[in-house]
Image: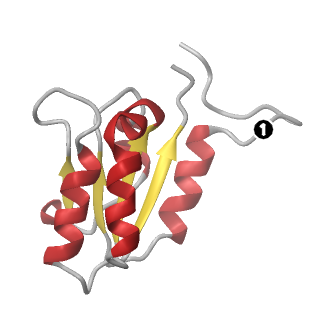
Amino acid sequence: MPNNRAQSGSKLSFVDALERLNTLLAENRVLTTDGGRFMTEVWFRVEAERPQRFLAGADSGSIGLGLQSAIGLALAAPQRCVCHFSGDGGFMMGGLTEFNTAVRLHLPMVVVVCNDAA
């Protein structure tokens, strides 16, 4: 398993980026994830205020379905920032077209696409 920590002089590591995002994202956020290799690192590193403000979009065992759920949450709770994490593969499967919906509706969302080098 590769080391997810950056070495001196190298690019930013996935783990370091997630830990930094955890401190920068809105405190009253709703955290959502798609399915994929990246998701367990997000679950370990990015916090939700309470369990009711966390949704894992991998319940069906498939990747590429999380952003649609995140958009639904943003419509249902516009007073909160929905912070969605997707893998690069899942995002390309359907997230890219669904991202257009979030932009057109001006939804309060942050979408992070994680390149897990799969």
Q: Check disc 1 and report its element: helix, strand or loop.
A: loop
The residue carrying mark 1 is 11
Residue at 18% across, 67% down = 73
Say whether residue 94 is left or right of residue 15. left
Question: x%, y% of residue 118?
Answer: 51, 19
Q: Residue furthest right?
A: 9
Colour scheme: secondary structure
Say whether residue 80 is left or right of residue 12. left
- The mark tally for this picture is 1
Front in this rendered view, residue 81 or 63: 63
Front in this rendered view, residue 52 or 74: 74
Question: x%, y% of residue 26?
Answer: 42, 76
Question: x%, y% of residue 115?
Answer: 55, 35
Q: Is 5 located above or below residue 17 in the figure?
A: above
Residue at 25% across, 86% down = 79
- Dividing the picture into quadrants, the one containing residue 61 is top left
Q: What's under tag 1, amino acid-wise?
A: Lys
